[in-house]
Image: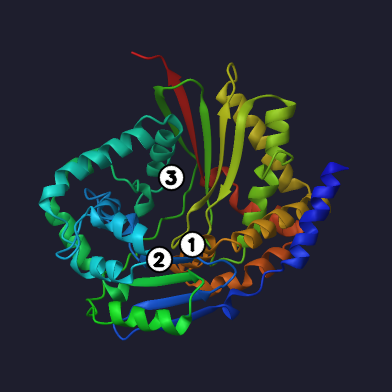
Amino acid sequence: MWHRRVLLVTILLLAIHRPTAYAAQVQELVLDNGLKVLLLEDHKSPAVTFQVWYRVGGRNEKDGKSGLAHFLEHMMFKGTPTTGPEEYSRIIAKNGVELELEADRMANALLGETYFEAEKKVIQEERRLRTDDNPAAALSEVASAVAFMIHPYRRPVVGWMEDIQNLTRQDLVDFYKLYYEPNNAFIVVSGDFSSDDILAKIRAAFGKIPRGAEPPKVVTQEPEQRGERRVIFKKEAELPFTLLFYHTPNLKSPDSFALDLLSVVLAGGRSSRLYHELVYQKRLVRNVDADYSGVVIDPMGFSITAQLLPGVEPTNLEREIDRLVEKVKTELISDRELQKAKNQIEAAFVFAQDSIFGQAMKVGSYEAAGGWKQMEGYLDGIRKVTRDDIRRVAREYLKTDTRTVGTLIPTKAQ
């Protein structure tokens, strides 16, 4: 009865708060210097989110120079000729959004030698904490390097430790000059503001920055995988960890909607197939997750990850996962399962719009991946997915020959 009430409340909320198309809310324009501006005027709360996105990241780096984009994320807060590094937080805390700070940072970041070596140590420590000392993250990093042979996705965003150590300040300066230009950026503003007023301020602050040279495009395409790849990673850890990664298309493919739903059917909550079977019924894992990475520039993948319980052999868990995945390939899921997955995705999409920060991040993510207007048809695409579509994409993409299996084998502390 409790579950029925929750489902009823969710359905009522979705009916009351039916999301309108973003195309009706977002105002788009491009300044003369190529800077795109996306405005989401929303007066439901007295707050504003102001974001500057640069169309650059780890995929734009070269071998031996991994981590540059992440390094610049740190160094962009280290001051300009008119603003000291310690002043950013104080000015924003006192005044709120400061457009001039971001415009100044776009054109005049110092990337000073004074802070370079110190910040390098901070980034190296960040890498140790988030990756080197995190067994699951370390396994994922190695598995990505195996799953992608030539595409830049094989490199970690934070950078390889050796690359970070060897980066120079001139590397940062060159990367900054190449990619951090108005014609390679866009602004997203969401919240309680007047579009006319803020647009005038954006023009005044950013319009005077000259257009830069067009940065080089990434044209590398990952070749088709023709056989399963395996990674055995031994590291000091408490429990084994298993990762299965399958190559899949991104949001440009009509199959992206069904893949989104497939991830929810398999591991979207405690009543999902993998969670119910592996956590509750057979007690093989502590947790299990499935994730589809669709909102990305280049095709990425569909992953299943699980933290094993003590005494469970990774090979046994892998057989169980394969059995459950095979069942989705051969048998149609129930109408109830499909509708439940659709409700979960739609609810998450709707409730994300209640936050002005969530609105801006959603618009920014889609714009970076290929265009914010692709969001307009997202919910309609989800609603049109059938049970046959779920079975078809499972057969098409969750194939042994196109996957990489990673296994963390715990070792004892030295």
Which badge, 3 or 2, comes first in the chain's sequence? 2
Horizontal side, residue 65 vs residue 359: left or right: left
Instruction: Tell me if label 2 and label 1 are in contact, CB under 8 Å.
Output: yes
Q: Position of residue 347 (x, y in %)?
A: 69, 57
State left or right for residue 307 relative to residue 97. Answer: right
Pointer 1: what residue? 361
Q: Which residue is labeled 3 in the image?
A: 147
| Residue 218 numbered tag | none
Q: Earlier in the sequence, mark 3 or mark 1?
A: 3
Q: Quadrant of residue 57?
A: bottom left
Can you give x and y, in whole percent of width and height, for residue 67 in the image?
A: 28, 49
**Residue 310 sits above or below residue 191 on the image:** above
Q: Residue 56 location, x and y as percent?
A: 33, 62
Q: What residue type is disc 3 on? A: Ala
- What residue does disc 2 label? 51
Distance (Cα) linking label 3 and label 1: 28 Å
Q: Nearer the viewer, residue 374 or 152?
A: 374
Nearer to us: label 3 or label 2: 2
Q: Does residue 308 appear anywhere in the picture?
A: yes
Amino acid type assigned to the residue bearing label 2 in the image = Gln
Mark 2 and mark 1 lie on one chain; the one further toward the N terminus is 2
Q: Secondary structure at mark 1?
A: helix
Residue that appears at 61% across and 36% down: 288
| Picture quadrant where residue 380 is located | bottom right
